[in-house]
Image (spheres, grey):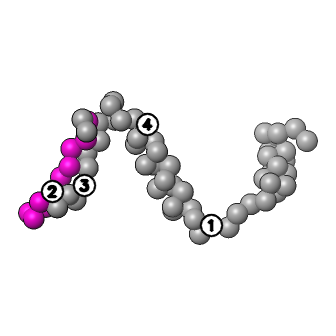
Amino acid sequence: MGGIQFLTDEKGQKTAAVIDLKVHKALWEDIADVLVSQSRKHERGLSLEKAKAGLIARGKLRG
C-alpha cells in the first residue's frame, strides 16, 4: 500500500506506521475517530432532552 511506511524492531516486527496524510487523509481521520471513540467509551451518556436543553440555553438551538 503506497503512502504508508512501517517501522520495525530488531526482530522485524512492525512497531509503528508513518502515514502520508496527503495520500491517506481519510484513513487517518477514520483512525482518529476510532481513537476518540475508544477514549470516551466509559463516559456517561447524555440524554437527547438534556443535550437539547443545553443547546437552547446557550443560544445554539431554538426551542
Most extreme residue toward the top is 22
Give the image quarter of residue 26: top left
Q: CA distance from mark 1 to mark 3?
A: 28 Å
The image quarter containing residue 48 is bottom right
Label 4: which secondary element: helix
Seen from the viewer's position, the closer of residues 25 and 52 is 25
Identify the amino acid type marked 1: Glu
Tag 3 residue: 16
Q: Is residue 4 magenta?
A: yes
Local packing at callout 2 (Cα closer than 10 Å; few below 14, some 14-19, many 20+) is few
Find residue 32 and report its horizontal and vertical position in percent. 45, 49
Q: Can you tell which of label 1 and label 2 is closer to the viewer? A: 2
| Residue 9, label in figure | none
Q: Earlier in the sequence, mark 3 or mark 2?
A: 2
* Whether label 3 touches label 2, CB < 8 Å: no
**Looking at the image, is 23 positioned above or below residue 45?**
above
In-image side of 28 versus 18 (left or right): right
From what the image shows, is residue 9 above or below residue 24?
below
Against 26, residue 44 (above or below) is below
Indicate the quadrant containing the C terminus: top left, top right, bottom left or bottom right: top right
User: In the rendering, at what x and y percent does residue 49 appear?
Assistant: 84, 55
Q: For residue 26, which numbered disc appears in the image?
A: 4
Q: Which residue is mark 2?
A: 8
Which callout, 1 or 2, points at the residue further toward the start of the chain? 2
Q: Which residues are magenta?
A: 3-12
Amino acid type at mark 4: Ala
